[in-house]
């Protein structure tokens, strides 16, 4: 009997949160469930309880010593950790086999060979969904390692990138939850701290260039069998005393009628069992599905979404939408929906990506203006990250849009909880970037045809303005009032930055400079930046800002006087005490 250990190590960022959620390792759970359906595999292999916590490798020594095959899911956030644990495994178990799969394994031959050469400690790499290919491999483990479909290695490649690579018959996607793959983990946790990623469909028909599902070969959508979905919901509520959060990870939830039935079933079981579980949706359908409005209203009714309805626009710039091939998902279709939802009393928030190719500084300011005019109560932004297997990653796309990227190395010792961050704002890393397990590597864009590096910094400074003054509520009412008096958002932004330039706002300039230093550390044009300061890490990983609310409060009177050069009267009475300012919260409690 061979022992297989599988792991999908979570994002460190999640573990650092106040609420320490144990996200069950869904991806490898699917692989184990499918493999066990095969009678040969089931009787010749024993699957250990899958791992998910990226702790010190040494703590896994006993498990790894007994493991014959180590299978790892690779995402951007755990690539370095996986490389480190694989080397450690080979050092204690030189005959063991290491297998890589997951979103970060490159499907194209050009990138595959570099990826393999950088990892001589890995025996076999699997591309795409692994249910069928891994089961076949385990069944034929004694055949030549170079012979397995959908895999590559140091000097061979058996991957053909077409739709069949991503087509998994739905009966091959059984629910790992229902099949008991995570029972041991669940039993070992005493309180309500488990997170479940839950899928009812796989794949996405769109092809946004920044997204891993955006490839043509991935455009198929598999609808998981209803029984499977229903049984998973029942499993969730059977463990409702331990499950804190369920994240629906479909790319386009609300696309089909069944999604409404799924939600109704959640409601029924919530009422029957009394278990309150937070349910979030990773991606709502983008293209005006007839079920979208009802889906959002139902989510709101059952789970109290009224303050948290997120719509992903990424940008309002037509040119950028075209450049990222999201033109097929028209924002115009979303605008009327926003009005309808607002009429139902919902507060809508938007999700954006900062610094997209095709966007200029002016476009970005217009994006802020449009969002404001749509009555969106808060904008959330994410950094643009370059990931393999996306259309944007491709060399031709890069050439066409003049894209220049760099690597940033983010040390884990600066990933502090928000409370820790507040008392560590000047901290620098102790990491010397020699140990793979102590940092994360991410590729980002610092320049493209539509903006140079300096303009990107200016774009990020406009986000600073909008986020700190509008999103956080610092002077939301003052901004609204001036807007009602005919001064657009772009003019308000201009007035602010003109005064900064003329050195008429010294304190705000100082606060802005702290932020500017952080973003320059991340985006400065050089091939690799080893990130050293906590502000830069915080900007990138958590808040997309530094410590502004607390600085505003510390310098309340001066900040008020400076802002009153634009806004006749600035009310600071609603600003919280410094001690109460947490990084995800707003500066006031309104809205
Ligand atoms: C949950 C999730 C998160 C969570 C992480 C939770 C956690 N556990 O740590 C959160 C919300 C924090 C998150 C953040 C981000 N995410 Co995310 N996320 C997901 C999501 C929605 C679900 C992952 C999942 O469980 N999928 C279901 C399983 C079944 O699919 P799978 O993982 O692909 O596994 C299959 C195959 O890959 C393969 N396989 C996997 N492992 C193995 C192992 C072996 C041995 C084999 C043979 C095969 C194999 O077989 C599996 C079954 O078919 C996916 C989108 C999606 N629906 O997949 C994005 C996704 C993984 N995220 C992505 C990205 C880009 C990000 C961000 C960088 C976004 C951003 N710009 O900020 C950030 C990370 C930032 C950071 N550094 O912290 C990309 C992946 C890019 C990459 N190469 O890693 C995805 C694919 C989204 C996309 N379409 O682009 N994410
Ligand atoms: S961003 Fe969303 S809509 Fe676009 S390809 Fe990815 S999953 Fe599909």
Image (cartoon, rainbow, N blue to C red):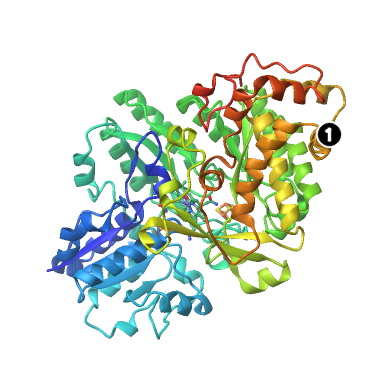
Q: Is residue 199 visible?
A: no
Q: As rendered, which of 377 and 538 lies closer to the eye?
A: 538
| Furthest residue toward right | 486
Q: As rendered, which of 491 and 31 lies closer to the eye?
A: 491
Task: Specify whether 10 is left or right of 585.
Answer: left
Height in image: 229 above or below 389? above
Q: As rendered, which of 181 and 125 lies closer to the eye?
A: 125
Dot 1: within a 10 Å radius of its alpha carbon, few (fewer than 14), some, or many (20 or more) residues? Answer: some
What residue lies at 57% left-to-right and 33% top-to-bottom? 309
| Furthest residue toward top | 573
Q: x, y (%) of residue 83?
A: 36, 66
Query: Which quadrant holds the C terminus?
Result: top right
What residue lies at 19% left-to-right and 71% top-to-bottom? 93
Task: Specify whether 492 is left or right of 240.
Answer: right
Write down the residue under mark 1. Answer: 495
Q: x, y (%) of residue 252?
A: 54, 47
| Furthest residue toward left | 1
Q: x, y (%) of residue 557?
A: 69, 19
Task: Specify whether 162 is left or right of 158.
Answer: right
Task: Specify whether 57 is left or right of 488.
Answer: left
What residue lies at 50% left-to-right and 22% top-to-bottom? 580
| Count of numbered badges drawn on the protein | 1
Height in image: 188 above or below 132? above
What residue lies at 62% left-to-right and 34% top-to-bottom? 349
Q: Can residue 158 be seen in this view?
A: yes
Disc 1, SS: helix
Height in image: 320 above or below 276? below
Quarter residue 549 falls in: top right
């Amino acid at each position: 009997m061979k022992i297989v250990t599988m792991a999908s190590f979570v994002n460190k960022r999640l573990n650092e949160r106040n609420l320490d959620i144990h996200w069950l390792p869904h991806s490898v759970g699917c692989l184990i469930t499918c493999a066990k359906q095969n009678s040969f595999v089931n009787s010749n292999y024993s699957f250990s309880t899958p791992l998910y916590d990226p702790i010190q490798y040494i703590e896994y020594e006993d498990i790894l010593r007994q493991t014959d095959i180590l299978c790892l899911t690779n995402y951007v956030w755990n690539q370095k950790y996986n490389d480190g644990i694989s080397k450690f495994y080979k050092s204690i178990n030189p005959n063991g086999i290491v297998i890589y799969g997951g979103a970060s394994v490159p499907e194209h031959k050009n990138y595959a060979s570099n990826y393999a050469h950088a990892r001589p400690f890995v025996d076999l790499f699997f591309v795409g969904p692994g249910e069928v290919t891994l089961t076949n491999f385990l069944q034929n483990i004694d055949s030549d390692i170079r012979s397995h479909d959908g895999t590559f290695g140091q000097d061979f490649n058996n991957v053909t990138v077409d739709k069949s690579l991503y087509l998994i018959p739905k009966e091959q996607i059984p629910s790992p939850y229902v099949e008991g793959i995570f029972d041991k983990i669940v039993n070992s946790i005493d309180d309500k701290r488990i997170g479940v990623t839950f899928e009812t469909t796989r794949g996405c028909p769109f092809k946004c260039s920044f997204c891993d599902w955006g490839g043509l070969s991935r455009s198929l959508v598999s609808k998981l069998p209803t029984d499977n979905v229903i049984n998973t919901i029942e499993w969730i509520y059977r463990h409702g005393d331990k499950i804190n959060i369920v994240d629906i990870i479909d790319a386009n939830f609300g696309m089909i009628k069944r999604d409404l039935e799924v939600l109704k079933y959640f409601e029924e079981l919530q009422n029957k069992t009394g278990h309150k579980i937070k349910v979030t949706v990773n991606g709502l359908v983008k293209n005006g599905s007839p079920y979208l409005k009802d889906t959002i209203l139902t989510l709101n009714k059952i789970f109290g979404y009224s303050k948290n309805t997120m719509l992903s626009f990424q940008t309002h710039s037509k040119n950028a939408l075209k450049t990222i091939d999201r033109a097929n998902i028209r924002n115009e279709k979303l605008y009327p929906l926003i009005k309808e939802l607002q009429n139902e009393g919902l507060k809508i928030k938007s999700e954006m990506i900062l610094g997209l190719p095709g966007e200029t500084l002016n476009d970005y300011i217009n994006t802020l203006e449009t969002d404001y005019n749509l009555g969106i109560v808060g904008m959330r932004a994410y950094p643009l990250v370059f990931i393999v297997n996306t259309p944007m990653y491709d060399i031709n796309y890069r050439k066409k849009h003049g894209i220049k990227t760099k690597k940033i190395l983010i040390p884990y010792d600066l990933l502090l909880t928000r409370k820790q961050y507040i008392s560590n704002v000047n901290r620098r890393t102790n990491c010397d970037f020699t140990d793979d397990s102590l940092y994360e590597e991410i590729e980002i864009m610092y320049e493209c045809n539509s903006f140079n590096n300096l303009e990107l910094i200016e774009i990020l400074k406009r986000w600073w303005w909008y986020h700190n003054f509008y999103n956080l509520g610092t002077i939301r009412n003052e901004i609204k009032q001036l807007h009602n008096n005919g001064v657009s958002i772009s003019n308000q932004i201009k007035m602010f930055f003109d005064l900064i330039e003329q050195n008429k706002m010294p304190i705000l300039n100082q606060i802005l400079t702290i932020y500017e230093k952080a973003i320059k550390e991340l985006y400065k044009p050089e091939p690799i930046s080893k990130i050293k300061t906590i502000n830069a890490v915080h900007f990138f990983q958590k808040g997309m800002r530094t410590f502004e609310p607390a600085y505003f409060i510390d310098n309340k009177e001066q900040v008020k006087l400076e802002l009153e050069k634009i806004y006749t009267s600035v009310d600071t009475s609603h600003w919280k005490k410094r001690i109460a300012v947490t990084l995800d919260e707003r500066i006031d409690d309104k809205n």
